[in-house]
Image: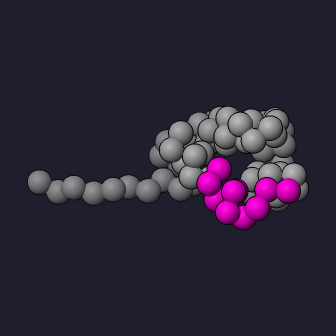
Amino acid sequence: MVEAILWDNDGVLVDTEGLFFQSTRETLAKAGIELTFEQFLDISMRQGRSAFQLAAGCGWTAEQIAGLKLERDRL
């Protein structure tokens, strides 16, 4: 038997963008930051940046943001 892990980073095989947005939105909401889908598209897709930069703009440290990202990943 062959076992493998397939990474679908660009969403071609499975459309995970909506789930990624929702988990990012829920995590940022716990930090008191409201993220709209339009903001997510603009920051992540058009600018190629992380939506977690919104937390940095609110004074969150790099360590705190790393914790938020870990929580997002768990979701």
Outermost residue on the bottom side: it is 62
The spot of residue 51 in percent (x, y) is 76, 51
Specify whether residue 71 is in view: yes
* Image point (33%, 56%), residue name: 5
49 shown above or below 30:
below
Classify residue 39 by image quadrant.
Answer: top right
Position of residue 40 in the picture relative to residue 74 (left or right): right
Q: What secondary structure is the stretch in magenta mostly built from?
A: helix
Outermost residue on the left side: it is 1
Magenta stretch: residue 42 in it? no
Relative to the observer, which residue lies in front, 22 or 47? 22
The spot of residue 32 in percent (x, y) is 80, 38
Q: Please give the count of numbered marks on the rendered protein.
A: 0
Position of residue 3 in the picture relative to residue 59 (left or right): left
* Image point (72%, 64%), residue name: 62
Q: How is the image coloured?
A: one colour
* Image point (67%, 40%), residue name: 27
Q: Which residues are magenta?
A: 59-68
Specify whether residue 45 is in view: no
Classify residue 49 by image quadrant.
Answer: bottom right
Magenta stretch: residue 63 in it? yes
Relative to the observer, which residue lies in front, 47 or 58? 58
The spot of residue 36 in percent (x, y) is 81, 35
Quadrant of image for the N terminus = bottom left
Relative to the observer, which residue lies in front, 74 or 18? 74
Classify residue 17 by image quadrant.
Answer: top right
62 shown above or below 38:
below
